[in-house]
Amino acid sequence: MPNNRYPILNTYVNAISMDETITEVEKIIKAGKPTQHVVINALKVNLMNENSELQKIVNSCPLINADGASIVWAAKKLGVPLKERVAGIDLFENLVKLAAEKGYKIYLFGAKEEVVTKVKKIFGEKYPTIQIVGYRNGYFTEADEPEIVKNMHNSGADMMFVAFSSPKKEFWVNKYLNEMNIPFVMGVGGSFDVVAGVTNRAPKWMQDHGLEWFYRFIQEPRRLWNRYVVGNWKFVVYTYKVKREKKKAKA
C-alpha cells in the first residue's frame, strides 16, 4: 500500500491522485487478498464520530480516498498534503473502464432491481469486452445473505461495487469480506442511480468548485437538510476544533 497515508480528523486519508489510486487497486487485485476500500466525506466523518465500530472499520481499510470537497477543505486547514479529490463515482467509472481493458471481472451489488439491471446493460453496451460475472439488487433479508455471499464467492469476480448508503455498506462488506473472497470491494453509494440516469450529477463547474453537495441538496432539500446543512456545519465546527487542538499540542 502507498506510504503517503495521513491522519485527518478521526480517520486517515491516502494523499494520492486518481491515477495512483488505480495503480494501487491493480496491485490489490494481483495480490488476491480480499480488501475493503472506502472513500471519506463530511457525512462519513460525522458518522464515525457517533459510531466507534464504523470508525474502526474505515480506519482498518488500507486504501482511503478523499471523496468530498469537504475533506479537501479540511486537509488544507489541517496541513495534510492531499494531492486531489478522488470522487467515488469517478473512481468507480474509471475502474469499470479498466476492467474492460484488462479483463478484470466485476460484480454489481445494490440499488433497485431495475437500476442494477440497467447499469449492467449500460456498461455492457459501452464496453463490449466487459465481464460482469454477477449482479444483484440491494433488497434482501438476513436469511438471504448466506446464499448471496456464496454466489459472490463463486463468481470469480476481481472487483465488486456495493451501492448501499453509509454506514450499511461499510458494515456489510466488513462482515463478509473474507467469505466473498473478492480481491477489491468498494462501496459506491448512489453511483448506480447516477449511471442509470435515476439521479443527476452536478454540472462539472459545480464539481470543480466543491458545490456538488449543494446541487444534490436543492434537488431534495427536505430529505437532505440534516445531511448537508446540519451535517456540513457539524463537520466545519469539528475541523476547527481539531485544528485548535493541534495548535495547542504544538505549543
Image (spheres, rainbow, N blue to C red):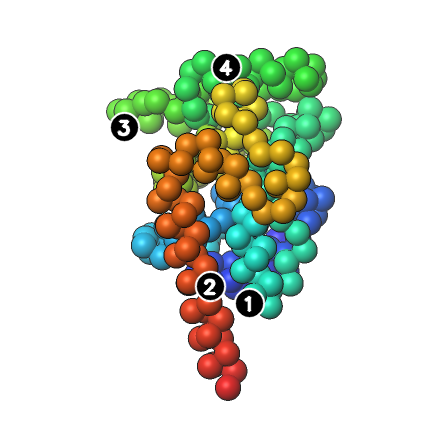
Q: Pinpoint residue 234: horizontal percent, then vertical percent.
A: 39, 57
Q: Earlier in the sequence, mark 4 or mark 1?
A: 1
Does dot 4 land on a helix, a strand or a loop?
A: helix
Q: Who is closer to the viewer here, 65 or 1?
A: 65
Q: Who is closer to the viewer here, 155 or 237?
A: 237
Image marks 2 and 1: residues in contact by CB distance under 8 Å: yes
Q: Distance between the residues labelled 4 and 3?
A: 22 Å
Report the residue marked by disc 4: 117
Q: Pinpoint residue 47: horizontal percent, then vertical percent.
A: 37, 50
Q: Earlier in the sequence, mark 3 or mark 2?
A: 3
Q: Residues within 10 Å of mark 3 (few under 14, many from 20)?
A: few
Q: Which amino acid does label 4 sit on?
A: Thr
Residue beneath the point at 59% across and 47% down: 210
Q: Which amino acid does label 2 sit on?
A: Thr
Report the residue marked by disc 3: 142
Q: Which amino acid does label 3 sit on?
A: Glu
Give the label on residue 78, or none. 1
Q: Earlier in the sequence, mark 1 or mark 3?
A: 1
Q: Is residue 204 above or below residue 140?
A: below
Q: Earlier in the sequence, mark 4 or mark 2?
A: 4
Residue beneath the point at 69% across and 31% down: 98
Q: How far apart are marks 4 and 1 (CA)?
A: 42 Å
Residue beneath the point at 50% across and 45% down: 38
Q: Is residue 24 above or below residue 198?
A: below
